[in-house]
């Protein structure tokens, strides 16, 4: 299983445009097993969202391709931007060091 965190920013005056675009997007996305989204204040950057996305085991690259397709229409909304980061569990990081995290 792969895990990605997408951070999204957009101006407050584009909230309706963003919401309308989300409603147009598919609810099921290939290779994605779980998706949780959270809103937060982004300070000077406007509105911020965190998307925690879990992928099928061995399909992280394919899932990222699907996420890029999913978010491409949002790039037409002025001020929208996002950052995608692959995440690793702490126990997995310790395992890479030959250690065990209890």
Image: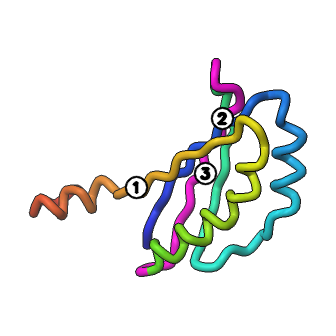
Mark 3 vs 2: CB contact within 8 A: no
In percent of width and height, residue 73 lies at 76, 57
Compared to residue 64, the image places residue 10 above or below, namely above
Query: Which secondary structure lies at badge 1?
Result: strand
Nearer-N-terminus badge (1/2): 2
In percent of width and height, residue 6 lies at 56, 50
Compared to residue 45, the image places residue 75 above or below, namely below
- Residue under label 3: 51
Question: Which range of residues does the magenta coloring cover?
Answer: 43-58
Give the residue at x 43% y 73%: 1
Give the residue at x 27% y 58%: 91
Nearer-N-terminus badge (1/3): 3
In percent of width and height, residue 66 lies at 61, 71
Give the residue at x 46% y 73%: 61
Q: Residues within 10 Å of mark 3 (few under 14, many from 20)?
A: some
In percent of width and height, residue 102 lies at 23, 56
- Residue under label 2: 48
């Amino acid at each position: 299983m792969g895990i990605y965190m997408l951070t999204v920013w957009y101006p407050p005056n584009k909230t309706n445009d963003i919401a309308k675009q989300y409603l147009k997007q598919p609810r099921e996305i290939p290779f994605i097993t779980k998706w949780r989204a959270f809103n937060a204040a982004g300070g000077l950057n406007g509105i911020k969202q965190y998307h925690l996305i879990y992928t099928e085991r061995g399909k992280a690259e394919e899932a990222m391709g699907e996420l890029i397709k999913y978010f491409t229409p949002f790039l037409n909304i002025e001020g929208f931007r996002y950052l995608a980061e692959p995440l690793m569990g702490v126990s997995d990081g310790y395992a890479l060091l030959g250690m065990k995290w209890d």
